[in-house]
Image: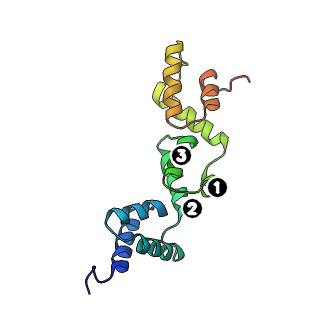
């Protein structure tokens, strides 16, 4: 029996190989299987079966993705948007995001690593740092607080 004789088995084998490399969201997995020419109905059946067996999980993917991207210095706004683009429901994302204090500390670390401990001296430099930190996915209020605060301190509200 060849792969052409068993399209479901072939699609499942490809999906399992993809999942062995790294976690995927269900939408990512479906897209990759479709790119390889598998039938849409077969893809749906395979993904449903893999989800039932616990081999693919959007919740598990969200957790791994949040850990990975936050370790790379990305903030919650960007991570949330990236997961949404990958088809992960917001209700599965939220439990994996740390609280605001953790993100604020992460933001300080990213700022210090990139720009050092000195505060921005000119409006142009402040704007450059703001753009960088916003693009990394940190909320604008937190960016303002970090840029307004002396090293390690909190800015007055």
Image quarter where the N terminus lies is bottom left
Image quarter where the C terminus lies is top right
Of marks 2 and 1, which one's residue comes earlier in the chain?
A: 2
Q: Total of numbered circles in the picture?
A: 3
Residue 68 point in image, percent of width and height: 48, 50
Residue of label 2: 59
Distance in Å between CA atoms under marks 2 and 1:
9 Å
**Which residue does the image show at 73% across and 22% down from the upper left?**
156
Name the mark on residue 95.
Answer: 1
Of marks 2 and 3, which one's residue comes earlier in the chain?
A: 2
Give 131 or 88, whichever is nearer the viewer: 88
Give 57 or 30, whichever is nearer the viewer: 30
Distance in Å between CA atoms under marks 2 and 3:
15 Å
**Which residue does the image show at 63% across and 52% down from the upper left?**
94
- Above-or-below relation of 51 to 146: below
Q: Image quarter for residue 43?
A: bottom left
Residue of label 3: 81
- Above-or-below relation of 135 to 17: above
Of marks 3 and 1, which one's residue comes earlier in the chain?
A: 3
How crowded is the residue under tag 2: few (<14 C-alpha within 10 Å), some, or many (20+)?
Answer: some
Residue 111 lies left or right of residue 142; in this view the side is left
């Amino acid at each position: 029996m060849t792969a052409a004789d068993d399209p479901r088995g072939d699609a499942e084998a490809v999906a399992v190989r993809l999942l062995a490399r790294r976690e995927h969201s269900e939408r990512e997995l479906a897209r990759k299987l479709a790119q390889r020419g598998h039938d849409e109905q077969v893809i749906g059946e395979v993904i449903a079966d893999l989800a039932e067996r616990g081999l693919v999980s959007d919740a598990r993917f969200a957790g791994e993705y949040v850990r990975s991207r936050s370790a790379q210095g990305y903030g919650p706004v960007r991570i949330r948007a990236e997961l949404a683009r990958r088809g992960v429901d917001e209700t599965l994302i939220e439990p994996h995001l740390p609280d605001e204090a953790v993100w604020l500390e992460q933001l300080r670390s990213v700022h210090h690593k990139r720009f050092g401990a000195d505060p921005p001296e000119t409006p142009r430099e402040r704007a450059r740092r703001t753009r960088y930190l916003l693009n990394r996915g940190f909320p604008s209020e937190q960016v303002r607080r970090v840029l307004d605060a002396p090293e390690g301190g909190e800015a007055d509200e």
